[in-house]
Image (tube, grey):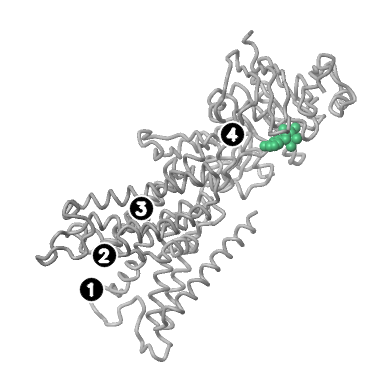
Amino acid sequence: MSDTSHGTGGLTFDKTKRSWPNEMNILLALIIIIVIFEILGQILPYMRDQSFLFDSKDRFDSIFNEARLKIIILQVAIIGIIALGVTQVIITAGIDLSSGPLVAATAMIAMSFGQTELVNGFPNPKALFGTWAMDLPVIVPIVAGLAFGAFIGAINGTFIAFLRIPPFIATLGMFLICRGIALWWSGGNPISFPTASYKFIGSGMMPVVWFLSLAVIFHLIMRYTVYGKHTYAIGSNEEAARMSGINVKRHKVMVYTIASMLAAFAGIVLASKSETAQAGMGEFYELFAIAMAVIGGISLQGGRGSIIGTVLGAMVLGVIRSGFTYIKLDGSYQLMAMGSIIIAAIVLDQYRQRNKA
Amino acid sequence: MSDDLVLKTEELTKHYGGVHALVGANFEMKKGEHVAIMGDNGAGKSTFVRQITGVEQRTSGKVWLYGDEVNFAGPLDAREAGIETVFQTLALADDLDVPDNLFLGREKTFANWLGPFRLLDYKGMRNDTIAGLERTGVKIPNIRNSIRNMSGGQRQCVAIARTATFASKLTIMDEPTAALGVQETAQVENIIHTLKEAGEPLILVSHNMRQVMELVDRIVVFRRGRMVANLRKEDTDGQDVVAYITGAKTGAEFEGAA
Ligand SMILES: Nc1ncnc2c1ncn2[C@@H]1O[C@H](COP(=O)(O)OP(=O)(O)O)[C@@H](O)[C@H]1O
Ligand SMILES: [Mg+2]
């Protein structure tokens, strides 16, 4: 502090720059993982010189293997939508375990208002309600699903903020309740055959379009709005946030509501993509969504992390999943690898935290 | 009541369950006055501060600010009424940077029709922050670093600069130098001098006798939740004040209180 060469307060313009963002580390990790799979593809005896992400055949159009890139992002897109909400919850130093079952319950509810009356000229064999619920405009299943999500999220938030139930417990209870609702809604039967317009919103690459658009929107919200700033402030120091005049309780209810609406939207899209809704859908989704956030550098202590981090975390999970398939190791290895990476990410976060304290 | 009083409390009382942390405090301060609150740990000093800043709801009693009776529903109310406070537990968000912390809870924004999603005016807040830091002479190497990476003294300075960034009718500092080194303490005391010259009233909670004797006009002593002395600096000395703090003496008008 004895350096007096700067202006008053030691402030000059270049001294208001941000430091190296943590997201760059995750991007680096992502690239390293891709390189490892590339190398494995070259050296493993049974792989015969295939490339992981690059085109093995020398074609004109592009150097990348688009098919694999598409699959990687498509298979993380729906859970990624949930992760956008979970990210906000974790930034407040909370957690949301209810999102997986909420996906299932919302899929059931949305699909029951998104069914088509006639399948190949015959009455829909999986019809849940009467004809009044058939061939409704696509807005109906969407609004029904989002409203249900908002309802569940508001309950989560209210119990956590006003009744001071620990988020882990409150959302664990909601985890079971939502799975119960999913089973009860149709008595355990699948609900199938959506209308053409409902089918569209989850078709092809649409889940990716939703995921990336929502990621951009919530990135902007978290970075440039009062909502985002207060979310970080609460996770960083809840008491300070309260003493600064932030309505912490109301804000938490808002965060949990938004998170559940995002999970509900994931359910709406998943049902559309699968063209059916089943009570068992979305198993482990809450855990994978949390994993994406944690790998993406969202600190479980709250206050730190970003939407960009979570999107990169989703990509890491997608690449690992696809990479294991690529080197022909089955799902059991994938789970073990992902588990290890999640633990590594948390260890890294704790280490960073201790170093800074 | 006369409105040359900045702050007046009448029988201000706070109970935490069975703990009578503050009992019947009658406190007054005039315009431009700097008043110290002294007392042992647990005497009720911070509790007194929390009752007049809307952080907690008092059990009973009345509070006037510039002649108007006030009932703050929350800390934001008190800040909007012109009370700027440096709390003992700094009330800083570690992961946010300096401008974020200065404006926490009252951000400069635009597009306010967006409600909770209104946009942050980062540039405006950054400029005001730099101006506030310059006014108080606070030196912080990089205002866009998160508070986490700063020393205790720098954090304290951020908290104090926060009060100086906003025009205030009453500044309250709760043990602002308790955790600071000699140089950092001097910096905080400089800020207090600046406030005095500007005629801005201040309540300073402090254990530092030298500092109190140097800086303030009047010393109020708390003991076990009660006000036990109200001493003009000219009429007292360190030994005298210590006698009140420890309970060896009690002010005449407070007889029967403790
Ligand atoms: N939130 C609380 N709940 C219960 N007791 C409290 C609370 N805050 C303070 N107290 C008690 O009130 C008394 C006064 O505390 P405080 O105002 O912090 O003292 P000081 O700031 O003078 O050291 C202490 O006995 C303390 O333990
Ligand atoms: Mg105290």
Q: In this view, does A2 lie above or below A187?
A: above
Q: In which quarter of the image is ligand 1?
A: top right
For image coordinates 65% across by 38% down, the residue present is B157
Residue A276: mark in rendering: 2
- Marks 1 & 3 on one chain: yes
Between the C-alphas of marks 2 and 4, the distance is 56 Å
Residue B52, how many percent across, how many down?
63, 25
Q: Is residue B154 above or below residue B61?
A: below
Residue A216: mark in rendering: 3
Q: Which of marks 2 and 3 is in front?
A: 2
For the residue marked with disc 4, what is the amino acid? Arg
**Ligand 1 within 8 angstroms of badge 3 C-beta:** no
Sequence-wise, the earlier of marks 2 and 3 is: 3
The residue at which mark 1 appears reads as A61
Between the C-alphas of marks 2 and 3, the distance is 29 Å
For the residue marked with disc 1, what is the amino acid? Asp
Secondary structure category for the residue under label 1: loop
Q: Which chain carries label 2?
A: A
Q: Left or right: A162 with respect to B250? A: left
Judge by depth and name the residue closer to the eye, A261 or B186: A261
Between the C-alphas of marks 1 and 4, the distance is 57 Å
10 Å crowding of disc 1: few (<14), some (14-19), many (20+): few
For image coordinates 26% across by 65% down, the residue present is A276
10 Å crowding of disc 4: few (<14), some (14-19), many (20+): many
Would you identify the image quadrant in which residue B43 lies? top right
Q: Left or right: A15 with respect to A324? A: right
Secondary structure category for the residue under label 3: helix
**Residue lying at the far bottom of the rendered structure:** A45
- Marks 2 & 3 on one chain: yes
